[in-house]
Image (tube, rainbow, N blue to C red):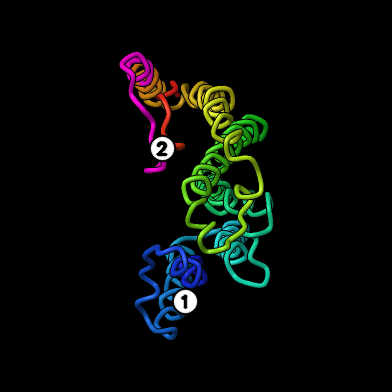
């Protein structure tokens, strides 16, 4: 919501649709405010710890800092990448851990902390991957609107070459470690991972292509995982 409100001008310059542009400013503000309040409803329905409440607040703060000028971390290099990853994956994951740790306190602290570290690492990798792919797919629109994201400040050809390597050498090992850690509690993810690996290998052998968007430069042979 907030990101869309402060992207109205840049989206218009890029010819990109933005539903917030259809609303008057008062309704834009009201909608964002109601969404903000709705995020705190579970606090009143359940017994959330102060840490969980703080994490909900932080999860609203990150996209606000990312979007709102003059701070607008979206245009402040790699800090914008980290902030988006924090808002999209890391903080919600830590929030879930904080909530369930409060409901079912772990019997021993060390195993819970180790498992939590693995889960948060996985969330960070997913968040980093997500924003890198998003900014890469949106780089043409950002260029048209004059938005200087981190992706536009680096060699996008090298980034395109790097991302499959990141998927294979970073994301995949972290996913496997996470599945291994949760296996004693829930073996289902290991089955899903095995099916995923087989499917990806078959797609690669059959010559499937990965298309990030319609830009020919963002279309490549499907690399496993």
Query: Mark 2 or mark 1, which is nearer the start of the sequence?
Result: 1
Report the side of 25 relative to 128 (left or right).
Answer: left
Residue farthest along the top direction in this orientation: 205
Q: Are marks 1 and 2 in contact (CB under 8 Å)?
A: no
- Specify whether residue 212 is painted magenta: yes
Q: Is residue 70 left or right of residue 166?
A: right
Of residues 108 and 37, the one drawn nearer to the viewer in this rendering: 37
Task: Classify the position of the C terminus by image quarter.
Answer: top left
Q: For mark 2, what is the residue?
A: 216
Q: Residue at x 39, y 75 (%)?
A: 21
The residue positioned 61% from the left and 50% from the top of the image is 152
Q: Is residue 127 above or below residue 119?
A: below
Q: Secondary structure at mark 1?
A: helix
The residue that mark 1 highlights is 33
Q: Start and end of the magenta stretch?
A: 200-216
- Viewer-proximal residue among 176 and 94: 176
Under tag 2, what secondary structure?
A: helix
Q: Residues within 10 Å of mark 2 (few under 14, many from 20)?
A: few
């Amino acid at each position: 919501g907030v990101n869309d409100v402060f992207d109205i001008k840049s989206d218009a310059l890029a010819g990109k649709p933005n539903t917030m542009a259809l609303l008057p400013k008062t309704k834009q503000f009201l909608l964002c405010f109601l969404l903000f309040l709705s995020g705190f409803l579970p606090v009143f329905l359940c017994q959330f710890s102060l840490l969980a409440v703080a994490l909900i607040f932080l999860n609203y703060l990150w996209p606000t800092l990312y979007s709102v000028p003059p701070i607008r971390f979206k245009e402040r290099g790699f800090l914008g990448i980290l902030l988006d990853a924090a808002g999209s994956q890391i903080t919600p994951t830590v929030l879930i851990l904080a909530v369930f740790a409060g409901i079912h306190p772990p019997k021993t602290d060390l195993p819970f902390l180790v498992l939590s570290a693995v889960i948060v690492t996985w969330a960070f990798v997913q968040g980093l991957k997500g924003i890198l792919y998003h900014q890469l797919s949106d780089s043409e629109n950002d260029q048209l609107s004059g938005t200087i994201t981190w992706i536009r400040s680096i060699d996008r050809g090298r980034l395109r070459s790097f991302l499959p390597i990141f998927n294979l050498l970073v994301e995949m090992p972290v996913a496997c470690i996470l599945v291994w850690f949760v296996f004693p509690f829930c073996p289902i993810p290991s089955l899903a991972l095995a099916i995923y690996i087989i499917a990806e290998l078959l797609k690669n052998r059959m010559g499937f292509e990965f298309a990030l968007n319609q830009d020919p430069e963002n279309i490549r042979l499907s690399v496993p995982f």
